[in-house]
Image (cartoon, rainbow, N blue to C red):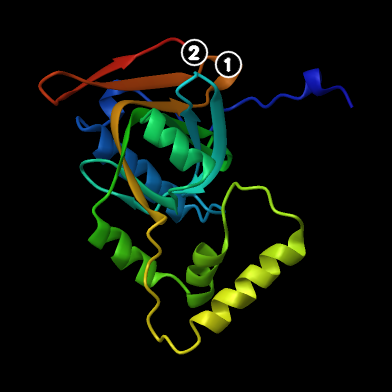
Amino acid sequence: MNIADLRQDYRQKSLDLSDTAADALTQFQAWFQEALNAHLLEPNAMTLATCSRAGKPAARIVLLKGVTEKGFTFFTNYESQKGQELDENPQVALIFNWLDLQRQVRIEGIATKIAAHLSDAYFQSRPRMSQLGAIASPQSRVVTDRAFLEKSMQNAIEAHAQMPVLPRPAHWGGYEIVPERIEFWQGRRSRLHDRIVYTKTETGDWERSRVAP
């Protein structure tokens, strides 16, 4: 197999400035709804890129759990690698890659922890075993083996067996990413892709422009 020969010519749709909403979050919600309607596998999966204080980048897939007129929300362990990096440097990037629609959305913005009561509410909406997993797992830390994790989980199950409602652990909660730049990418033939970029102005409005592929 010659990896260099792998290529796909995109020809499903086009994207022009006249096709987009004036507000970037409104445009995202419209595209996200189309991804839902297409029954894509986990359309809310997004790459989250962070950077340490020293400038070392890291990226991983997380799940979008909310989008409002203000920004994007996801949940994680605050003591994980990404949590520590977000404490050091709140500037982040997100990527949604919807290959079946030949679309990509790139987001750059600032991450902040959401209010505790919002994290509490989402934690209580999760399946009980997912709640226990958040309690049991020392995310991103070195562990001896799989047996350690399974034992930690069993300990959490037993310790909370008599508690019908589990308290959210202090080390777990949500972040909201307030975007400063959002790019909507639509694949086109001959690699002449459509790219429409929204940039937040000092007044809080969005400016739209087309950039070359």
Q: Looking at the image, which is closer to me, 65 or 137?
A: 137
Which residue in the rendered view is the most extreme toward the top?
A: 212
Label 2: few (<14), some (14–19) or many (≥20) C-alpha neighbours in 10 Å? few
Residue type (three-letter) at the residue carrying disc 2: Pro
Work out whether 137 lies above or below 114.
below
Question: Residue 139's x, y, as percent?
Answer: 57, 52
Work out whether 212 lies above or below 187.
above
Residue contact between numbered discs 2 and 1, judged by CB atoms under 8 Å? yes
Q: Looking at the image, which is closer to me, 147 or 127?
A: 147
Question: Can residue 155 be seen by looking at this rendering?
Answer: yes
**With 107 as the anchor, is 189 left or right in this view?**
right
Label 1: which residue? 191
Label 2: which residue? 213
Query: At x 51% / y 46%, what residue is drawn?
Result: 80
Question: Can residue 106 be seen by looking at this rendering?
Answer: no
Spatial distance from mark 2 to mark 1, Cα to Cα? Answer: 7 Å
**Which of disc 1 and disc 2 is earlier in sequence?**
1
**With 94 as the anchor, is 154 left or right in this view?**
right
Question: Residue 75's x, y, as percent?
Answer: 41, 52
Query: At x 46% / y 33%, what residue is drawn?
Result: 85
Give the quadrant of residue 190: top right
Which residue in the rendered view is the most extreme toward the left?
A: 203
